């Protein structure tokens, strides 16, 4: 009996034809031209960095254990283990990709210890280039650049006395007595592991997902925080199509991918396996019970218990953009399969900044440090979808399309008055030193003095992060009349939301919203 993958029987179990195999070979060559695969040297460097992180995790647990009066032997036995998740764990990362890393610790090690002891251990390492801790995030996180590699570090505490190196996270009972933040942290690794277990051919899945990641990034529909699927969400979608065509090569999976999703009867959920009950009182996605779950427009459900909707951030506008891009991608794939276009046609870049006549620019500014600006701009970014949702409610706005990337600048100002104008989005004669906030953070962390130290003397530094929302505005009514466009109320509500930032300081932080005409 052939094993069935997924909750339904496959659509086709046909093996690939010689033509499909040849087309798949062309696809792999295009992925190489796109720079999708990292070099062996970079791959080895990642392994070295993860080995150091494992050593730091064990030292972190040992030091905390000693502080809590464990004997030296018991402190060493308490363990600590790192797991990866996301693109790296799925095997679809490329050159320069970050590594999503989870540190699992025993029950006596707290989240506060993570931001005190482990952060201190990181800062003591000579390989550290950048660091930014965000303890107030939905999933508390420490972001670092270490030996040139970006790493997102999260931590989770299990209700067990020690965490050995042979621990796996498959057992649902390990989730007992963990809080919501720990549960979310653990879910990343558990979901990634489940995805790989639930696809019929891992190599086919990885090649297809690499293509979809490049396509989604080039078309600016990649980024969960902005209301688009992220890496794991696109991964679940690709995995579902792999289940429906278990013997197909990646080229065929891609052609089916666009057709299947365009015909999908949203909000019917995408599931890789049946939603399961478990040992916790945890909430599992269920629109029949929870009214909030009924509001999810394109529900993509995580396979690991407790199953959650991974796409709750998708709004009416971002759904329209996603479906528009799926339609475009499907048309191109049909032409590729007929030999009328090369694979490179799929990866044409977006035209966001010429697609709309009107845009909103949202500037998050601060007069603190670069690290403080990262926290502030990150908070504003996390709330931007709420502004999008309020704009969507206006009759005169057909679509509010948030751009997935931000624009960071560092300004040197001569006076408080000039700094205030920069923070308010005005063009003044301030010197823009850098458009890379990460570099500014590196300057703060590193021991070397900045080359522009002389320029900085007696200057006021203002950091700005700019976000853009494209607006499709329709002022004419069906009856031939004119609608009024007034975005004051949504903007004021957004201002209030941003001012709820834990460390908000009126003298340090500001938000400025302006309309921009293309």
Image (cartoon, rainbow, N blue to C red):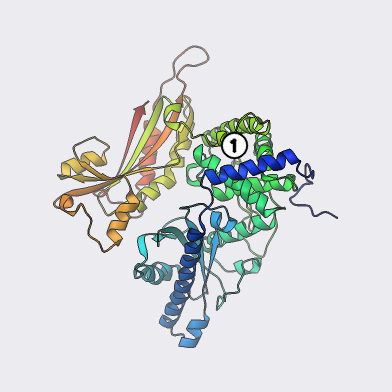
Q: In which quadrant of the rendered view does residue 489 lie?
A: top left
Q: Quadrant of the N terminus?
A: bottom right
Is the C terminus in the top left, top right, bottom left or bottom right quadrant? top left
The spot of residue 187 in percent (x, y) is: 58, 59
Q: Is residue 36 above or below residue 186?
A: above
Q: Nearer the viewer, residue 471 or 502?
A: 471
From where the camera sits, is residue 92 visible? yes
Dividing the picture into quadrants, the one containing residue 121 is bottom left
Question: Which residue is rendered at x = 55% and y = 40% of the image?
Answer: 215
Query: Residue at image x 66%, y 67%?
Result: 171
Residue 292 appears in the picture as rendered: no
Percent x, y of residue 481: 46, 13
Bin the neighbour count of mark 1 within 10 Å (Cα to Cα): few under 14, some 14-19, many 20 and up.
Answer: many
At a point 28% along the width and 59% down the height, the residue shown is: 444
- The kind of secondary structure element at disc 1 is helix
Q: Say which residue appears at 62% left-offset and 48% top-offset.
A: 207
Asked if residue 465 is positioned above or below residue 89 in the image, the reply reads: above
Using the image as rendered, state which of residue 478 and residue 365 is in the foreground: 365
Task: Determine which residue is flagged by label 1.
Answer: 343
Q: Position of residue 23 (x, y in %)?
A: 67, 39
- Front-most of 74 and 316? 74
Q: Is residue 152 left or right of residue 259?
A: left
* 47 to 26, vertically: above or below: below
Q: Position of residue 304 (x, y in %)?
A: 64, 58
């Amino acid at each position: 009996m052939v094993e069935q993958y997924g909750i339904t029987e496959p659509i086709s179990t046909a093996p690939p034809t010689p033509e499909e195999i040849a087309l798949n070979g062309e696809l792999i060559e295009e992925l190489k031209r796109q720079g999708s695969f990292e070099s062996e040297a970079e791959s080895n460097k990642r392994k070295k960095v993860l080995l150091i992180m494992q050593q730091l995790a064990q030292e972190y647990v040992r030091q905390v254990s000693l502080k809590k009066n464990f004997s030296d032997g018991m402190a060493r036995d308490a363990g600590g283990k790192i797991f990866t998740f996301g693109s790296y764990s799925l095997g679809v990362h490329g050159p320069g990709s970050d590594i999503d890393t989870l540190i699992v610790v025993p029950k006596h090690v707290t989240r506060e210890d993570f931001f005190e002891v482990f952060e201190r251990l990181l800062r003591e390492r000579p390989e550290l280039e950048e660091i930014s801790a965000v303890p107030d995030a939905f999933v508390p996180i420490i972001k670092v650049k270490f030996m040139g590699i970006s790493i997102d570090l999260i931590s989770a505490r299990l209700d067990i006395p020690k965490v050995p190196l042979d621990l796996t996270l498959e057992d649902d009972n390990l989730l007992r007595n963990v809080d919501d933040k720990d549960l979310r942290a653990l879910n990343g690794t558990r979901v990634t592991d489940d995805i790989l277990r639930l696809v019929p051919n891992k190599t086919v899945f990885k090649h297809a997902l690499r293509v979809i990641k490049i396509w989604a990034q080039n078309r600016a529909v990649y980024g969960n925080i902005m209301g688009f699927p992220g890496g794991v969400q696109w991964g679940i979608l690709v995995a579902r199509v792999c289940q429906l065509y278990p013997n197909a090569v990646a080229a065929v999976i891609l052609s089916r991918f666009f057709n299947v999703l365009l015909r999908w009867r949203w909000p019917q959920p995408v599931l890789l396996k049946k939603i399961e009950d478990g040992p916790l009182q945890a909430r599992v996605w269920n629109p029949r019970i929870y009214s909030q779950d009924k509001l999810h427009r394109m529900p993509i459900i995580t396979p690991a218990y407790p199953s959650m909707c991974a796409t709750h951030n998708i709004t009416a506008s971002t759904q329209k953009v996603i479906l528009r891009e799926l339609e475009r991608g499907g048309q191109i794939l049909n032409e590729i399969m007929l030999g009328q276009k090369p694979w490179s046609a799929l990866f044409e870049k977006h035209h966001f900044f010429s697609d709309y006549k009107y845009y909103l620019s949202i500037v998050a500014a601060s007069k603190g440090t670069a690290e403080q600006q990262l926290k502030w701009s990150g908070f504003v970014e996390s709330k931007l979808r709420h502004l999008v949702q309020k704009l969507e409610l206006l009759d005169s706005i057909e679509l509010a399309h948030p751009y997935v990337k931000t624009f960071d600048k560092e300004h040197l100002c001569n006076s408080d008055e000039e700094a205030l104008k920069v923070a308010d989005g005005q063009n003044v004669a301030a010197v823009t030193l850098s458009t890379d906030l990460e570099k500014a953070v590196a300057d703060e962390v590193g021991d070397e003095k900045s080359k522009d130290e002389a320029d900085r003397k007696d200057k006021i530094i203002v950091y700005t992060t700019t976000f853009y929302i494209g607006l499709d505005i329709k002022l004419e009514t069906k009856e031939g009349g004119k609608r009024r466009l007034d975005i004051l109320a949504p903007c004021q509500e957004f201002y209030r939301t941003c001012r709820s930032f834990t460390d908000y300081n009126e003298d340090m932080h500001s938000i400025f919203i302006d309309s921009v005409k293309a």
